[in-house]
């Protein structure tokens, strides 16, 4: 990638759900589309293209991991 293309990517306010967001999250195509459909990953639809707002992606990547709640013994 040349410097001009890299600069344009920095200016964009969204990233493509597939493959860019999936790659950043380290998940498969199926998983990223399921997360978008479930509302776990905010998206913007432009025609057939699903985009993820960069601020939302940055919040998701910088979020503290949540551990499952311990279940009480019965």
Image (cartoon, grey):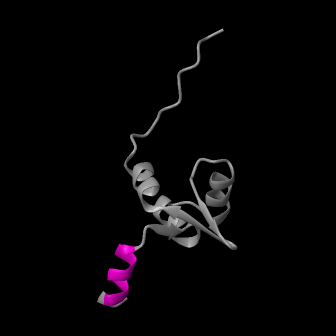
Where does the N terminus fall, quadrant-wise?
A: bottom left
What is the span of residues highlighted in magenta in the rendered image? 4-11
Please identify the residue farthest to the front as the structure is shown: 46
Where does the C terminus fall, quadrant-wise?
A: top right
Residue at 68% over, 61% down: 30
Please identify the residue farthest to the left as the structure is shown: 3
Residue 2 figure quarter:
bottom left
Left or right placement of residue 43 versus residue 58 in this view: right
- The spot of residue 17 in percent (x, y) is 57, 66
- The spot of residue 66 in percent (x, y) is 46, 35
Left or right placement of residue 2 versus residue 36 in this view: left
Residue at 40% over, 55% down: 58
Q: Main secondary structure of the magenta part?
A: helix
Of residue 15 and residue 33, the one placed in the foreground of this image is 15
Residue at 56% over, 72% down: 19
* Rendered position, 33 above or below 72: below
- The spot of residue 54 in percent (x, y) is 43, 61
Residue at 32% over, 89% down: 4
Residue 16 figure quarter:
bottom right
């Amino acid at each position: 990638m040349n410097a001009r293309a890299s600069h344009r990517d920095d200016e964009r306010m969204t990233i493509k759900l597939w493959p860019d967001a999936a790659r950043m999250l380290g998940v498969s195509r199926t998983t990223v589309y399921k997360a978008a459909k479930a509302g776990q990953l905010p998206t913007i639809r432009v025609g057939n293209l699903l985009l993820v707002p960069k601020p939302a992606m940055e919040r998701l990547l910088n979020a503290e991991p949540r551990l499952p709640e311990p279940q009480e013994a019965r």
